[in-house]
Image (spheres, coloured by chain):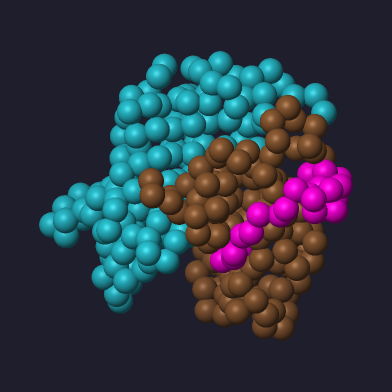
Chain colours: A cyan, B brown
Amino acid sequence: MMLPPPRPLEQRIADTRARFAADMDTWVATAGADGPALVPLSFDWDGKAFVISTLPRSVTARNIADSGRVRLAFGPTRDVVTVEGTAERIPTAEVDAVADAYAAHTDWDPREQSEEYAWFRVTPRRIQAWREANELRGRDVMRDGVWLG
Amino acid sequence: MMLPPPRPLEQRIADTRARFAADMDTWVATAGADGPALVPLSFDWDGKAFVISTLPRSVTARNIADSGRVRLAFGPTRDVVTVEGTAERIPTAEVDAVADAYAAHTDWDPREQSEEYAWFRVTPRRIQAWREANELRGRDVMRDGVWLG
């Protein structure tokens, strides 16, 4: 199989930002006493962090409350973006400030559900982007919360 | 948005089995002392379990060695299959028995790498399959290792 040449860093960053702006869902992995959890959740990216929303009794919400550690995965498995981030709950008084943008982006508003949802802000610390094996080298596009480009 | 009607159980099982046979990669979530890990890995499905392979020094391999707990995710986020499974290392003497099928399915043979890879068998205990919100009810297609259909 002939692979295209590996994308330079600037292109990977541009592709990553474009994916964050365009995609509606992400895989969310968390860890707790029962091991790993992995669910798809809708998200909104404000340019610096992801906003996600789930039921407070869900395993994901409880794992985040315990540790705040989150991994996100975007894209098909041959055009991957992975994020290592820290999650914090958004106080109820601040939800409306993010929920309108979330609802506009995802076409779904958890505030209209009968159960109250919990909202979280996930701040990326490390981001990696690669397509095939020839892009494994140079896959870091953010480290310690700073874009490398 | 008009959604198609939810698929009945038998259709979800057929679609799930078809995806396991056709797909080459899966998202693999594990948990360890450093929180969750989430990576895409190639796999082969033999009808009962998944075979995956990764470097023994990888976080995923170390997390599996610690707990054996794995979550897998397949498909785009609006046509999801998730698997809760237990992973065990395949003894070196038994690798060749699974690696040929793995290499044929994934078009990649870890035995040709300079570093020796670790091989794992992931046995599903629970499988869920859903597309949109109207399929959340009835998403269990396997429980306690038994297909429900």
- Residue B128 drawn at (x, y percent): 59, 70
Q: Is residue B140 left or right of residue B44?
A: left
Where's the C terminus of chain A, which quadrant? top left
Q: Position of residue B136 (x, y in %)?
A: 52, 73
On screen, B116 above or below A5? below
Q: Determine which quarter of the picture holds residue B126.
A: bottom right
Magenta segment includes B120: no
Which residue sits at x=64%, y=19%? A6
Residue extending farthest left:
A93
B138, above or below A109, in the image: below
Residue range corresponding to the magenta coloring? B81-106
Q: Is residue A35 visible?
A: yes
Q: Is residue A147 left or right of residue A78?
A: left
Q: Is residue A104 visible?
A: no
Q: Residue B141: which quarter of the image? A: bottom right
Of B28 and B137, nearer the camera is B28
- Could you tell me residue B79's position as x and y percent? 61, 60
Magenta stretch containing residue B102, yes or no? Answer: yes
* Image x and y of residue A76, in percent: 62, 43
Number of disc labels: 0
- Name the residue rendered at 58%, 22% in the picture: A137
Q: Which one is in front, A48 or B143? A: B143
Along the viewing direction, whichever of A27 and B108 lies nearer the viewer: B108
Q: Up-down: is B146 above or below B45?
A: below
Farthest-out residue, bottom? B149
Give residue B39's quadrant in the image.
top right
Which quarter of the image is occupied by the N terminus of chain A?
A: top right
Front residue of B131 and B125: B125
Query: Residue, x 49% and y 39% (percent of image)?
Result: A82
